[in-house]
Amino acid sequence: MNWQLIEQLRLRLNANGLPYEIPIHPQLVHLTLGLLIIAIVFDIAGTFFALEKPIFKFLGLPALRSGFFDVGWYNLIGAAFISFFTVAAGFFELLLANPPVDQKSVWGLTTGWTMLLHGLGGVLLLGAIAAMTVWRGLQRYRWRKDASRQVQWSYLLAGMVIMAILFVHGTLGAQLGENFGIHVTAAKLLQEGKNPNLILK
């Protein structure tokens, strides 16, 4: 744990090793994931709209192809925006981590390697999501603005690859909490017989 940083910021840490009761990074991670998944899924739905249109008509649901692409675009903007805060919160919480040095994850990685890969992966994924947003904007407003299908096949493929990488990346993050106990939640502390309201320092 970076005690100099704690002293400089005059932080009072809770039992989870953070100056607040609930870790912020995992909350923002799920927001990033949800927005990104919705963005890609709705762009896929817009791409295959011709196949789905009879179903919408049968169900009496008014649906426009452009509406699917609108949902995809605005959710991707949201994912890119919130991802900056997700990564920032992740690095702040990693700086305050007090990891065990003699344990390994279920993947056989030490805490240090898991933290390094998760941190580096977060920065790379942030860059990838930002690049996807720029790419998607160029398709929407320049390259395919007059086309009925607003996204390229390569864009959809890239989106699915990023979602698969996010799964692996998220698993590393989950291992930091589950295998190494980094910033465990109140429920985990209670299971260990500890009081989540106690102050470490």
Image (cartoon, rainbow, N blue to C red):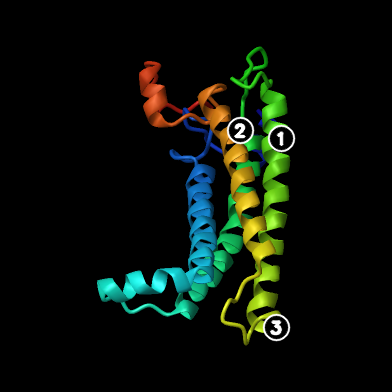
Q: What's the amino acid at mark 2? A: Leu
The residue indicated by pointer 1 is 117
Gap in angstroms between the C-alphas marked 3 and 2: 38 Å
Task: Indicate left or right for 187 with 93 as reference.
Answer: left
Secondary-structure class at tag 1:
helix
Task: Indicate left or right for 149 with 116 as reference.
Answer: left
In the rendered image, the residue lying farthest to the bottom is 146
Q: Which of marks 3 and 1 is nearer the N terminus?
A: 1
Do the residues bearing badges 3 and 1 touch, measured as CB atoms within 8 Å? no
Image position, residue 42 (x, y; %): 49, 65
Where 86 sits versus 6, above or below? below
Q: Which of marks 1 and 2 is nearer the N terminus?
A: 1
- Does the rendering let one see residue 69? yes
Task: Indicate left or right for 122 with 64 as reference.
Answer: right
- Does the rendering let one see residue 4? no
- Tell me what residue is drawn at x 28 percent, y 73 percent: 58
Q: Pick the residue in front: 193 or 118.
A: 118
Where 91 sits versus 86, above or below? above
Task: Indicate left or right for 138 with 194 as reference.
Answer: right
Do the residues bearing badges 3 and 2 touch, measured as CB atoms within 8 Å? no
Q: What's the amino acid at mark 3? A: Arg
Number of callouts: 3
Where 81 sits versus 117, above or below? below
Q: What's the amino acid at mark 1? A: Leu
Point out which mark residue 79 bears.
none
The residue indicated by pointer 2 is 172
Point out which mark residue 142 bears.
3
